[in-house]
Amino acid sequence: MILLKSIPKVDKFITHKAFEGLSTSLITKISKKIIGNLREDILNNRIQNIDENILVSNVLKEYEIITTPSLQTLINATGIIVHTNFGRSLINKKSLEKAIQIATSYNNLEYDLNEGKRGERYSHIVKTLQNLTDCEDAIVVNNNASAVFLILNTFAKNKEVIVSRGELVEIGGSFRVPEVMSQSGAILKEIGTTNKTHLRDYENAIDEKTSMLMKVHKSNYSIEGFTSEVDFEEIVKVAKENNIIDYYDMGSGHIIDLPFNLSSNEPSILEIMKYKPSLLSFSGDKLLGSVQAGIIIGKKELIEKIKKNQLLRMLRVDKITLSILEDTLNSYLKNELDEIPTLKMLYTKIETLEQRASKLLEKVANICICEVIKTQTLIGGGTTPNKKIPSIALTIEHKKYKPNQIEKLLRKNNLIARIENEKILLDFRTIQENEIEKIADILKKIFESVN
Protein backbone atom coordinates (compact mmCIF):
# COMPACT_ATOMS: atom_id res chain seq x y z
CA MET A 1 0.00 0.00 0.00
CA ILE A 2 3.05 2.26 0.30
CA LEU A 3 3.18 2.35 -3.49
CA LEU A 4 -0.42 3.62 -3.63
CA LYS A 5 0.59 6.60 -1.51
CA SER A 6 3.29 7.40 -4.09
CA ILE A 7 0.76 7.89 -6.89
CA PRO A 8 0.98 11.54 -7.99
CA LYS A 9 -2.01 13.81 -7.39
CA VAL A 10 -3.67 14.75 -10.67
CA ASP A 11 -3.87 18.48 -9.90
CA LYS A 12 -0.13 18.61 -9.20
CA PHE A 13 0.87 16.17 -11.94
CA ILE A 14 -0.76 18.25 -14.71
CA THR A 15 1.47 21.23 -13.81
CA HIS A 16 4.54 19.35 -15.08
CA LYS A 17 6.63 21.58 -17.36
CA ALA A 18 6.32 19.03 -20.20
CA PHE A 19 2.63 19.96 -20.48
CA GLU A 20 3.20 23.70 -20.89
CA GLY A 21 1.29 25.13 -23.87
CA LEU A 22 -0.96 22.09 -24.18
CA SER A 23 -4.71 21.92 -23.52
CA THR A 24 -5.10 21.73 -19.72
CA SER A 25 -8.53 20.10 -19.95
CA LEU A 26 -7.32 17.36 -22.31
CA ILE A 27 -4.11 16.77 -20.31
CA THR A 28 -6.25 16.47 -17.16
CA LYS A 29 -8.59 13.97 -18.79
CA ILE A 30 -5.71 11.81 -20.07
CA SER A 31 -3.83 12.05 -16.76
CA LYS A 32 -6.86 10.87 -14.78
CA LYS A 33 -7.16 7.87 -17.08
CA ILE A 34 -3.47 6.93 -16.95
CA ILE A 35 -3.17 7.47 -13.18
CA GLY A 36 -6.35 5.42 -12.72
CA ASN A 37 -4.79 2.59 -14.75
CA LEU A 38 -1.65 2.91 -12.62
CA ARG A 39 -3.71 2.43 -9.45
CA GLU A 40 -5.29 -0.73 -10.91
CA ASP A 41 -1.87 -2.09 -11.84
CA ILE A 42 -0.60 -1.55 -8.30
CA LEU A 43 -3.64 -3.23 -6.74
CA ASN A 44 -3.18 -6.21 -9.04
CA ASN A 45 0.59 -6.43 -8.35
CA ARG A 46 1.46 -5.74 -11.99
CA ILE A 47 4.09 -3.10 -11.16
CA GLN A 48 6.54 -2.66 -8.33
CA ASN A 49 7.57 1.01 -8.71
CA ILE A 50 6.38 4.31 -10.12
CA ASP A 51 8.42 6.29 -12.67
CA GLU A 52 6.89 9.74 -13.12
CA ASN A 53 8.88 10.31 -16.33
CA ILE A 54 7.19 7.27 -17.88
CA LEU A 55 3.77 8.58 -16.78
CA VAL A 56 4.52 11.96 -18.39
CA SER A 57 5.70 10.25 -21.58
CA ASN A 58 2.55 8.11 -21.73
CA VAL A 59 0.33 11.17 -21.30
CA LEU A 60 2.16 13.00 -24.10
CA LYS A 61 1.87 9.99 -26.41
CA GLU A 62 -1.87 9.74 -25.77
CA TYR A 63 -2.23 13.50 -26.30
CA GLU A 64 -0.49 13.22 -29.67
CA ILE A 65 -2.65 10.27 -30.75
CA ILE A 66 -5.86 12.12 -29.85
CA THR A 67 -4.89 15.45 -31.43
CA THR A 68 -3.31 14.07 -34.62
CA PRO A 69 -5.89 14.40 -37.45
CA SER A 70 -7.37 11.08 -38.47
CA LEU A 71 -8.02 12.26 -42.03
CA GLN A 72 -4.70 12.15 -43.87
CA THR A 73 -3.36 12.41 -47.39
CA LEU A 74 -2.56 9.21 -49.27
CA ILE A 75 -0.64 8.34 -52.40
CA ASN A 76 -3.05 6.34 -54.53
CA ALA A 77 -1.02 3.78 -56.47
CA THR A 78 -3.95 1.40 -57.02
CA GLY A 79 -4.76 2.78 -60.47
CA ILE A 80 -8.42 3.35 -59.54
CA ILE A 81 -9.13 6.98 -60.39
CA VAL A 82 -12.47 7.46 -58.62
CA HIS A 83 -11.62 5.46 -55.51
CA THR A 84 -14.60 5.47 -53.15
CA ASN A 85 -12.43 4.77 -50.09
CA PHE A 86 -9.92 7.49 -50.96
CA GLY A 87 -12.31 10.43 -51.32
CA ARG A 88 -13.28 9.82 -54.95
CA SER A 89 -12.35 12.64 -57.34
CA LEU A 90 -9.47 15.00 -56.61
CA ILE A 91 -10.42 18.67 -56.45
CA ASN A 92 -8.47 21.17 -58.50
CA LYS A 93 -6.29 23.35 -56.23
CA LYS A 94 -7.33 26.53 -58.02
CA SER A 95 -11.00 25.70 -57.40
CA LEU A 96 -10.27 25.15 -53.72
CA GLU A 97 -8.34 28.43 -53.46
CA LYS A 98 -11.34 30.27 -54.91
CA ALA A 99 -13.58 28.50 -52.40
CA ILE A 100 -11.26 29.57 -49.57
CA GLN A 101 -11.68 33.20 -50.65
CA ILE A 102 -15.46 32.76 -50.61
CA ALA A 103 -15.55 30.90 -47.29
CA THR A 104 -13.28 33.35 -45.46
CA SER A 105 -15.24 36.41 -46.62
CA TYR A 106 -18.85 37.49 -46.51
CA ASN A 107 -20.42 36.52 -49.83
CA ASN A 108 -23.62 36.61 -51.86
CA LEU A 109 -24.66 33.03 -51.12
CA GLU A 110 -28.30 34.05 -50.75
CA TYR A 111 -28.19 37.67 -51.82
CA ASP A 112 -29.16 39.10 -55.21
CA LEU A 113 -26.59 41.80 -56.03
CA ASN A 114 -28.70 43.18 -58.89
CA GLU A 115 -31.94 43.49 -56.93
CA GLY A 116 -30.43 44.22 -53.52
CA LYS A 117 -32.57 41.62 -51.79
CA ARG A 118 -32.60 37.99 -50.67
CA GLY A 119 -31.55 35.62 -53.43
CA GLU A 120 -31.37 31.86 -53.94
CA ARG A 121 -28.25 29.79 -53.28
CA TYR A 122 -28.92 27.45 -56.22
CA SER A 123 -28.82 30.34 -58.70
CA HIS A 124 -25.01 30.24 -58.66
CA ILE A 125 -24.92 26.97 -60.60
CA VAL A 126 -28.17 27.18 -62.61
CA LYS A 127 -26.82 29.49 -65.34
CA THR A 128 -23.74 27.32 -65.81
CA LEU A 129 -25.73 24.07 -65.98
CA GLN A 130 -28.25 25.62 -68.36
CA ASN A 131 -25.48 26.63 -70.77
CA LEU A 132 -23.70 23.34 -70.36
CA THR A 133 -26.61 20.87 -70.61
CA ASP A 134 -29.53 22.87 -72.10
CA CYS A 135 -31.61 22.05 -69.02
CA GLU A 136 -34.46 24.35 -68.00
CA ASP A 137 -33.48 24.44 -64.34
CA ALA A 138 -31.23 22.78 -61.77
CA ILE A 139 -30.72 22.21 -58.07
CA VAL A 140 -27.92 20.72 -55.96
CA VAL A 141 -28.10 18.60 -52.80
CA ASN A 142 -25.38 16.93 -50.74
CA ASN A 143 -25.07 13.68 -52.76
CA ASN A 144 -26.87 11.67 -55.41
CA ALA A 145 -28.54 9.41 -52.82
CA SER A 146 -30.17 12.56 -51.44
CA ALA A 147 -31.20 13.55 -54.95
CA VAL A 148 -32.91 10.17 -55.50
CA PHE A 149 -34.71 10.35 -52.16
CA LEU A 150 -35.82 13.95 -52.67
CA ILE A 151 -37.19 13.35 -56.16
CA LEU A 152 -39.12 10.26 -55.09
CA ASN A 153 -40.48 11.96 -51.98
CA THR A 154 -41.57 15.02 -53.98
CA PHE A 155 -43.35 13.30 -56.84
CA ALA A 156 -44.13 9.72 -55.81
CA LYS A 157 -45.17 9.73 -52.16
CA ASN A 158 -47.96 7.10 -51.86
CA LYS A 159 -47.77 6.63 -55.62
CA GLU A 160 -46.20 3.97 -57.84
CA VAL A 161 -42.79 4.18 -59.48
CA ILE A 162 -42.09 1.67 -62.24
CA VAL A 163 -38.56 0.25 -62.28
CA SER A 164 -36.98 -2.69 -64.11
CA ARG A 165 -35.99 -5.62 -61.86
CA GLY A 166 -32.57 -5.56 -63.49
CA GLU A 167 -31.97 -2.08 -62.06
CA LEU A 168 -32.86 -2.60 -58.39
CA VAL A 169 -29.29 -2.00 -57.35
CA GLU A 170 -27.40 -1.98 -54.09
CA ILE A 171 -24.32 0.21 -53.97
CA GLY A 172 -21.71 0.84 -51.28
CA GLY A 173 -22.90 1.25 -47.71
CA SER A 174 -25.96 -0.94 -48.33
CA PHE A 175 -27.76 1.81 -50.25
CA ARG A 176 -30.58 -0.15 -51.86
CA VAL A 177 -32.99 1.37 -54.36
CA PRO A 178 -36.06 -0.54 -53.06
CA GLU A 179 -35.41 0.54 -49.45
CA VAL A 180 -34.76 4.16 -50.41
CA MET A 181 -38.00 4.16 -52.38
CA SER A 182 -39.88 2.74 -49.41
CA GLN A 183 -38.49 5.32 -46.99
CA SER A 184 -39.26 8.15 -49.42
CA GLY A 185 -42.91 7.09 -49.42
CA ALA A 186 -42.87 5.85 -53.01
CA ILE A 187 -44.40 2.50 -53.96
CA LEU A 188 -42.10 0.30 -56.03
CA LYS A 189 -43.64 -1.49 -59.01
CA GLU A 190 -41.18 -3.99 -60.46
CA ILE A 191 -41.36 -4.95 -64.13
CA GLY A 192 -39.54 -7.39 -66.40
CA THR A 193 -37.04 -9.96 -65.18
CA THR A 194 -33.50 -9.72 -63.85
CA ASN A 195 -31.97 -10.10 -67.29
CA LYS A 196 -34.69 -8.85 -69.66
CA THR A 197 -37.04 -5.89 -69.61
CA HIS A 198 -39.00 -4.75 -72.67
CA LEU A 199 -40.78 -1.52 -73.57
CA ARG A 200 -44.14 -3.31 -73.34
CA ASP A 201 -43.37 -4.06 -69.66
CA TYR A 202 -43.39 -0.33 -68.94
CA GLU A 203 -46.47 0.29 -71.06
CA ASN A 204 -48.49 -2.54 -69.50
CA ALA A 205 -47.59 -1.50 -65.93
CA ILE A 206 -48.88 2.07 -66.20
CA ASP A 207 -52.20 2.76 -64.46
CA GLU A 208 -53.90 5.56 -62.51
CA LYS A 209 -51.53 5.04 -59.54
CA THR A 210 -48.36 5.55 -61.62
CA SER A 211 -46.44 8.77 -61.05
CA MET A 212 -43.06 7.98 -62.56
CA LEU A 213 -41.00 5.75 -64.86
CA MET A 214 -37.55 5.47 -63.32
CA LYS A 215 -34.31 4.17 -64.84
CA VAL A 216 -31.36 3.40 -62.55
CA HIS A 217 -27.73 3.14 -63.64
CA LYS A 218 -26.19 -0.25 -62.80
CA SER A 219 -23.26 1.41 -61.10
CA ASN A 220 -21.27 -1.56 -59.82
CA TYR A 221 -22.26 -4.53 -61.98
CA SER A 222 -23.27 -5.54 -65.48
CA ILE A 223 -25.58 -8.25 -66.80
CA GLU A 224 -24.09 -10.23 -69.68
CA GLY A 225 -25.50 -12.83 -72.09
CA PHE A 226 -29.22 -13.22 -72.81
CA THR A 227 -30.22 -9.69 -71.83
CA SER A 228 -32.13 -6.63 -72.95
CA GLU A 229 -33.04 -3.31 -71.40
CA VAL A 230 -35.00 -0.31 -72.62
CA ASP A 231 -33.12 2.80 -73.72
CA PHE A 232 -34.02 5.89 -71.74
CA GLU A 233 -35.13 7.62 -74.95
CA GLU A 234 -37.98 5.11 -75.25
CA ILE A 235 -38.89 5.50 -71.58
CA VAL A 236 -39.14 9.28 -72.06
CA LYS A 237 -41.52 8.82 -75.00
CA VAL A 238 -43.82 6.46 -73.08
CA ALA A 239 -43.83 8.80 -70.06
CA LYS A 240 -44.79 11.80 -72.19
CA GLU A 241 -47.55 9.83 -73.92
CA ASN A 242 -49.03 8.98 -70.52
CA ASN A 243 -48.44 12.40 -68.92
CA ILE A 244 -46.19 11.04 -66.17
CA ILE A 245 -42.64 11.84 -65.06
CA ASP A 246 -39.56 10.11 -66.47
CA TYR A 247 -36.48 10.09 -64.27
CA TYR A 248 -32.98 8.73 -64.81
CA ASP A 249 -30.76 8.17 -61.77
CA MET A 250 -27.47 8.26 -63.69
CA GLY A 251 -25.34 7.67 -60.62
CA SER A 252 -22.11 8.90 -62.17
CA GLY A 253 -22.88 11.21 -65.03
CA HIS A 254 -20.21 12.47 -67.41
CA ILE A 255 -20.28 15.51 -69.67
CA ILE A 256 -17.80 14.63 -72.42
CA ASP A 257 -17.12 11.42 -74.34
CA LEU A 258 -14.94 9.00 -72.41
CA PRO A 259 -11.73 7.49 -73.85
CA PHE A 260 -11.11 3.81 -74.58
CA ASN A 261 -14.59 3.47 -76.15
CA LEU A 262 -16.18 3.62 -72.69
CA SER A 263 -18.98 5.90 -73.88
CA SER A 264 -20.45 3.17 -76.13
CA ASN A 265 -22.34 1.76 -73.12
CA GLU A 266 -22.31 4.91 -71.00
CA PRO A 267 -24.26 7.76 -72.67
CA SER A 268 -23.23 11.21 -71.48
CA ILE A 269 -25.47 13.72 -69.75
CA LEU A 270 -25.50 15.77 -72.97
CA GLU A 271 -26.71 12.77 -75.00
CA ILE A 272 -29.50 12.04 -72.51
CA MET A 273 -30.57 15.69 -72.50
CA LYS A 274 -31.29 15.48 -76.24
CA TYR A 275 -34.38 13.43 -75.30
CA LYS A 276 -35.79 16.35 -73.26
CA PRO A 277 -36.22 14.25 -70.09
CA SER A 278 -38.26 15.31 -67.08
CA LEU A 279 -35.46 14.79 -64.53
CA LEU A 280 -31.88 13.54 -64.33
CA SER A 281 -29.66 13.23 -61.27
CA PHE A 282 -25.96 12.43 -60.98
CA SER A 283 -22.98 12.73 -58.64
CA GLY A 284 -20.60 15.66 -58.60
CA ASP A 285 -17.61 13.74 -57.26
CA LYS A 286 -17.40 10.86 -59.71
CA LEU A 287 -16.82 11.21 -63.45
CA LEU A 288 -17.85 14.84 -63.31
CA GLY A 289 -14.63 15.29 -61.32
CA SER A 290 -15.78 17.77 -58.70
CA VAL A 291 -16.92 17.95 -55.09
CA GLN A 292 -19.44 15.62 -53.41
CA ALA A 293 -22.91 16.69 -54.54
CA GLY A 294 -26.12 15.39 -56.04
CA ILE A 295 -27.05 17.41 -59.12
CA ILE A 296 -30.64 17.44 -60.37
CA ILE A 297 -31.45 18.93 -63.78
CA GLY A 298 -34.65 18.94 -65.79
CA LYS A 299 -37.97 20.69 -66.32
CA LYS A 300 -38.36 24.02 -64.53
CA GLU A 301 -41.85 23.26 -63.19
CA LEU A 302 -40.55 20.04 -61.57
CA ILE A 303 -37.45 21.68 -60.09
CA GLU A 304 -39.71 24.37 -58.61
CA LYS A 305 -41.75 21.67 -56.86
CA ILE A 306 -38.57 20.09 -55.47
CA LYS A 307 -37.54 23.49 -54.05
CA LYS A 308 -40.80 23.60 -52.07
CA ASN A 309 -40.15 20.23 -50.41
CA GLN A 310 -39.30 20.84 -46.74
CA LEU A 311 -36.65 18.12 -46.91
CA LEU A 312 -34.51 20.29 -49.18
CA ARG A 313 -33.35 22.43 -46.25
CA MET A 314 -31.87 19.30 -44.63
CA LEU A 315 -30.12 18.22 -47.82
CA ARG A 316 -28.86 21.50 -49.27
CA VAL A 317 -25.19 22.24 -49.90
CA ASP A 318 -23.03 25.03 -48.48
CA LYS A 319 -21.05 27.89 -50.01
CA ILE A 320 -17.83 25.84 -50.32
CA THR A 321 -19.52 23.06 -52.29
CA LEU A 322 -21.28 25.54 -54.56
CA SER A 323 -18.07 27.47 -55.19
CA ILE A 324 -16.03 24.39 -56.15
CA LEU A 325 -18.84 22.89 -58.22
CA GLU A 326 -19.41 26.14 -60.12
CA ASP A 327 -15.71 26.40 -60.91
CA THR A 328 -15.59 22.80 -62.18
CA LEU A 329 -18.63 23.34 -64.39
CA ASN A 330 -17.05 26.51 -65.77
CA SER A 331 -13.98 24.47 -66.71
CA TYR A 332 -16.26 22.33 -68.87
CA LEU A 333 -17.91 25.40 -70.39
CA LYS A 334 -14.54 26.94 -71.28
CA ASN A 335 -13.17 23.55 -72.47
CA GLU A 336 -10.38 23.72 -69.88
CA LEU A 337 -10.53 20.00 -69.20
CA ASP A 338 -6.96 19.80 -67.89
CA GLU A 339 -8.24 21.75 -64.88
CA ILE A 340 -10.27 18.68 -63.85
CA PRO A 341 -7.88 16.12 -62.26
CA THR A 342 -10.18 13.12 -62.83
CA LEU A 343 -10.34 13.76 -66.57
CA LYS A 344 -6.65 14.58 -66.74
CA MET A 345 -5.77 11.17 -65.23
CA LEU A 346 -8.29 9.38 -67.41
CA TYR A 347 -6.92 10.93 -70.61
CA THR A 348 -3.19 10.68 -69.79
CA LYS A 349 -1.46 8.80 -72.61
CA ILE A 350 0.23 5.46 -72.02
CA GLU A 351 3.53 6.92 -73.24
CA THR A 352 3.41 9.55 -70.49
CA LEU A 353 2.68 6.92 -67.84
CA GLU A 354 5.65 4.87 -69.12
CA GLN A 355 7.94 7.88 -68.80
CA ARG A 356 6.85 8.47 -65.21
CA ALA A 357 7.25 4.81 -64.28
CA SER A 358 10.73 4.75 -65.83
CA LYS A 359 11.66 7.82 -63.85
CA LEU A 360 10.81 6.05 -60.60
CA LEU A 361 12.54 2.86 -61.78
CA GLU A 362 15.81 4.77 -62.20
CA LYS A 363 15.60 6.03 -58.64
CA VAL A 364 14.93 2.68 -56.91
CA ALA A 365 16.37 -0.03 -59.18
CA ASN A 366 19.36 -0.53 -56.86
CA ILE A 367 17.30 -1.22 -53.72
CA CYS A 368 14.57 -3.59 -54.95
CA ILE A 369 13.58 -5.78 -57.89
CA CYS A 370 11.34 -3.72 -60.16
CA GLU A 371 10.03 -3.65 -63.70
CA VAL A 372 7.81 -1.38 -65.78
CA ILE A 373 4.85 -3.37 -67.15
CA LYS A 374 1.60 -2.85 -69.03
CA THR A 375 -1.52 -3.49 -66.98
CA GLN A 376 -5.22 -2.67 -66.75
CA THR A 377 -7.28 -0.89 -64.14
CA LEU A 378 -10.83 0.31 -63.41
CA ILE A 379 -12.13 3.86 -63.19
CA GLY A 380 -13.99 2.97 -59.97
CA GLY A 381 -16.60 4.82 -57.94
CA GLY A 382 -19.52 2.93 -59.46
CA THR A 383 -18.66 4.09 -62.98
CA THR A 384 -18.37 2.00 -66.16
CA PRO A 385 -18.81 -1.34 -64.31
CA ASN A 386 -16.40 -4.11 -65.37
CA LYS A 387 -14.83 -1.92 -68.05
CA LYS A 388 -11.04 -1.94 -67.76
CA ILE A 389 -8.71 0.71 -69.11
CA PRO A 390 -5.03 0.37 -70.04
CA SER A 391 -2.34 1.55 -67.66
CA ILE A 392 1.34 1.26 -66.73
CA ALA A 393 2.70 -0.02 -63.43
CA LEU A 394 6.01 -0.52 -61.70
CA THR A 395 6.27 -3.94 -60.06
CA ILE A 396 8.05 -4.09 -56.70
CA GLU A 397 9.67 -7.24 -55.25
CA HIS A 398 12.24 -7.88 -52.54
CA LYS A 399 13.98 -11.09 -51.56
CA LYS A 400 13.42 -10.47 -47.83
CA TYR A 401 9.74 -9.58 -47.99
CA LYS A 402 6.60 -11.25 -49.27
CA PRO A 403 4.14 -9.10 -51.29
CA ASN A 404 1.69 -8.75 -48.41
CA GLN A 405 4.54 -7.60 -46.13
CA ILE A 406 5.63 -4.98 -48.65
CA GLU A 407 2.02 -3.81 -49.07
CA LYS A 408 1.74 -3.35 -45.29
CA LEU A 409 5.03 -1.43 -45.11
CA LEU A 410 3.93 0.85 -47.93
CA ARG A 411 0.53 1.37 -46.28
CA LYS A 412 2.23 2.42 -43.02
CA ASN A 413 3.78 5.21 -45.09
CA ASN A 414 0.41 6.18 -46.62
CA LEU A 415 1.34 4.67 -50.00
CA ILE A 416 -1.49 2.38 -51.13
CA ALA A 417 -0.61 -0.19 -53.79
CA ARG A 418 -2.21 -3.38 -55.11
CA ILE A 419 -1.01 -6.97 -55.34
CA GLU A 420 -1.24 -8.78 -58.66
CA ASN A 421 0.41 -12.07 -59.68
CA GLU A 422 2.34 -12.17 -56.39
CA LYS A 423 3.89 -8.77 -57.07
CA ILE A 424 3.29 -5.29 -55.72
CA LEU A 425 2.04 -2.95 -58.43
CA LEU A 426 2.38 0.81 -58.31
CA ASP A 427 -0.11 1.87 -60.99
CA PHE A 428 0.75 5.18 -62.63
CA ARG A 429 -2.76 5.90 -63.84
CA THR A 430 -3.35 7.51 -60.41
CA ILE A 431 0.15 8.50 -59.33
CA GLN A 432 0.65 12.25 -59.64
CA GLU A 433 3.89 13.45 -61.20
CA ASN A 434 4.84 15.36 -58.04
CA GLU A 435 4.51 12.13 -56.01
CA ILE A 436 7.31 10.23 -57.79
CA GLU A 437 10.04 11.65 -55.56
CA LYS A 438 7.94 10.94 -52.44
CA ILE A 439 7.45 7.32 -53.51
CA ALA A 440 11.18 6.93 -54.13
CA ASP A 441 11.91 8.23 -50.62
CA ILE A 442 9.38 5.79 -49.10
CA LEU A 443 10.90 2.82 -50.94
CA LYS A 444 14.41 3.85 -49.88
CA LYS A 445 13.27 4.19 -46.28
CA ILE A 446 11.80 0.68 -46.35
CA PHE A 447 14.43 -1.25 -48.28
CA GLU A 448 17.83 0.45 -47.84
CA SER A 449 18.17 -0.63 -44.21
CA VAL A 450 17.68 -4.34 -45.06
CA ASN A 451 19.89 -4.59 -48.15
Image (cartoon, rainbow, N blue to C red):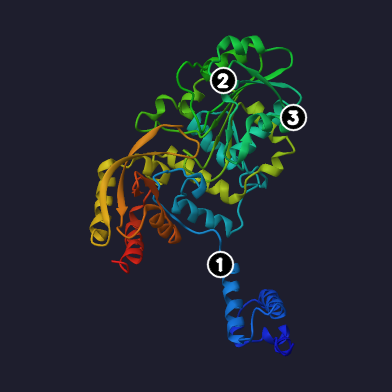
Q: Nearer the viewer, mark 3 or mark 1?
A: 1
Residue at 45% over, 56% down: 74
Q: Earlier in the sequence, mark 1 or mark 2?
A: 1
Q: Is residue 323 above or below residue 415?
A: above
Q: Residues within 10 Å of mark 1 (few under 14, many from 20)?
A: few
Residue pointed to by mark 1:
68
The amino acid type found where label 2 is placed reads: Thr
**Would you identify the image quadrant in which residue 283 lies?**
top right
Residue pointed to by mark 3:
185
Q: Quadrant of the C terminus?
A: bottom left
Please name whichever residue, 442 or 46, is drawn nearer the observer in this view of the structure.
46
Residue pointed to by mark 2:
194
Marks 1 and 2 sit apart, C-alpha to C-alpha, by: 48 Å
Q: Nearer the viewer, mark 2 or mark 3?
A: 2
Q: Residue furthest front?
A: 45
In the image: residue 225, left or right of residue 110: left
Q: Earlier in the sequence, mark 2 or mark 3?
A: 3
Q: Residues within 10 Å of mark 3 (few under 14, many from 20)?
A: some
